Image (cartoon, grey):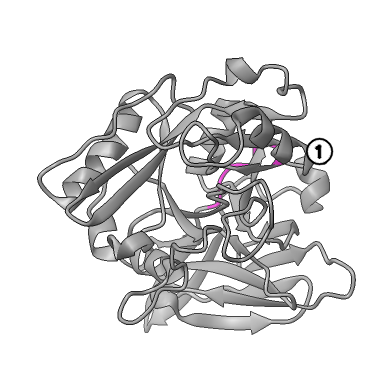
């Protein structure tokens, strides 16, 4: 892997950067980015949602793990429904270039709503939980994962149109939400009066919830045809910055938002200064790119076809995030950069 400084070109500043404005006459307001202290490290590509014959996939765990390793992934979570696969049983696949992180998709329901919460880096099989309300059922499964010091991510809210921003806003101790899922039946884009997953993300962010968006495969089909109506691998992943290929370090980085999500676009540099955000794209062949900078309420703040794409900071925003789309329709999402007033 490339080092963080090599991948990003230069290190993100180590301190919180400060700017000032005068939105209110006679009053000087200070704003600062909530920029994390850079600990150095490397970029690691991984998928946190995949199925095997241990639940409803079509291939055994060893086959699935080898597929990801052979296709350039650095880490993988096998997340079968209410089944735990011990990575020690696949120790022949794990080496200095590829890590298996233990996981499970806690699969429950409330009335007709499907409640699926992935538990990452858990020590053993957990029992999916139910409660007397939909919100309570989601929370109970998040809590089950937290109780064993695992990391939860809430899966595909629009699967069976199960729940949305109203319910998710009430969940506590969750940091990760699927905003892109490669399964063909999860309705990433929403429909009718139900918003898409990216819009749900903005609703939550705009109402003050600190949550980060991940892309996943939710792969089930490794055999036979790779087609849009099948749940094939390679459709969504996260690229995480961590000091080492270590499960705890990767989990800490995910929960701190030190990653970007992608369905195919790669980034080479993300730079934050006191007054702007720069997104540097790893250009592929003759593909063209459009970067959209998005803020509170899902409002488009600006767009750019340049590389790097640059957003000049203004003070009347709560956060800014970037969506980068290429001319084939593939996308990358940066995590929100929050702005605080003092």
Is residue 279 in view? yes
Q: Nearer the viewer, residue 170 or 278?
A: 170
- Place of residue 265 in the rendered image (x, y in percent of width and height, measured from the top left): 72, 63
Q: Is residue 279 left or right of residue 209?
A: right
In the rendered structure, which segment of residues is drawn in magenta? 35-44
The quarter of the picture where residue 285 lies is bottom right
Q: Is residue 58 left or right of residue 234?
A: left
Quadrant holding the C terminus: bottom left
Q: What secondary structure predominates along the stretch shown in magenta?
A: loop
- Place of residue 279 in the rendered image (x, y in percent of width and height, measured from the top left): 70, 65
Q: Nearer the viewer, residue 26 or 328?
A: 328
- Place of residue 30 in the rendered image (x, y in percent of width and height, measured from the top left): 45, 65
What is the number of callouts on the image?
A: 1
Q: Is residue 139 left or right of residue 79?
A: left
Q: Is residue 79 magenta?
A: no
Q: Nearer the viewer, residue 132 or 294?
A: 132
Residue of label 1: 1
Q: Residue at x 52, y 27 (%)?
A: 102
Q: Residue furthest left?
A: 132
């Amino acid at each position: 892997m490339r080092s963080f400084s090599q991948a990003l070109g230069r290190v993100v500043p180590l301190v919180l950067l400060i700017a000032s404005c005068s939105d209110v006459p006679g009053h000087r307001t200070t704003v600062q980015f909530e920029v994390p202290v850079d600990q150095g490290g490397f970029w690691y590509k991984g998928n946190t949602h995949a199925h095997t014959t241990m639940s409803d996939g079509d291939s055994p765990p060893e086959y699935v793990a080898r597929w990801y390793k052979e296709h350039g992934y650095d880490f993988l979570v096998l997340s079968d429904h209410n089944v735990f696969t011990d990575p020690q049983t696949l120790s022949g696949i794990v080496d200095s270039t590829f890590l298996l992180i233990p996981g499970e998709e806690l699969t429950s329901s409330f009335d007709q709503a499907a409640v699926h919460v992935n538990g990452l880096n858990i020590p053993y099989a957990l029992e999916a939980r139910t409660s007397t309300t939909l919100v309570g059922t989601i929370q109970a499964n998040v809590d089950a994962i937290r109780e064993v010091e695992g990391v939860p991510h809430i899966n595909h809210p629009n699967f069976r149109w199960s729940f949305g921003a109203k319910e998710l806003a009430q969940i506590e101790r969750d940091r990760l939400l699927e905003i892109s899922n490669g399964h063909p039946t999860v309705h990433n884009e929403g429909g009718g009066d139900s918003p898409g997953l990216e819009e749900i993300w903005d609703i939550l962010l705009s109402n003050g919830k600190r949550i980060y968006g991940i892309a996943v495969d939710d792969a089930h089909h490794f055999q036979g045809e790779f087609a849009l109506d099948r749940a094939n691998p390679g459709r969504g992943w996260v690229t995480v910055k961590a000091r080492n290929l270590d499960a705890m370090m990767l989990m800490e980085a995910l929960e701190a938002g030190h990653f970007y999500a992608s369905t195919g676009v790669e980034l080479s540099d993300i730079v934050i200064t006191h007054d702007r955000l720069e997104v540097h794209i790893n250009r592929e062949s003759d593909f063209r790119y459009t970067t959209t900078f998005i803020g509170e309420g899902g409002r488009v703040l600006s767009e750019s076809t340049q590389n790097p794409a640059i957003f000049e900071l203004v003070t009347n925003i709560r956060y800014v995030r970037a969506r980068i789309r290429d001319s084939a329709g593939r996308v990358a999402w940066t995590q929100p950069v929050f702005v605080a007033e003092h």
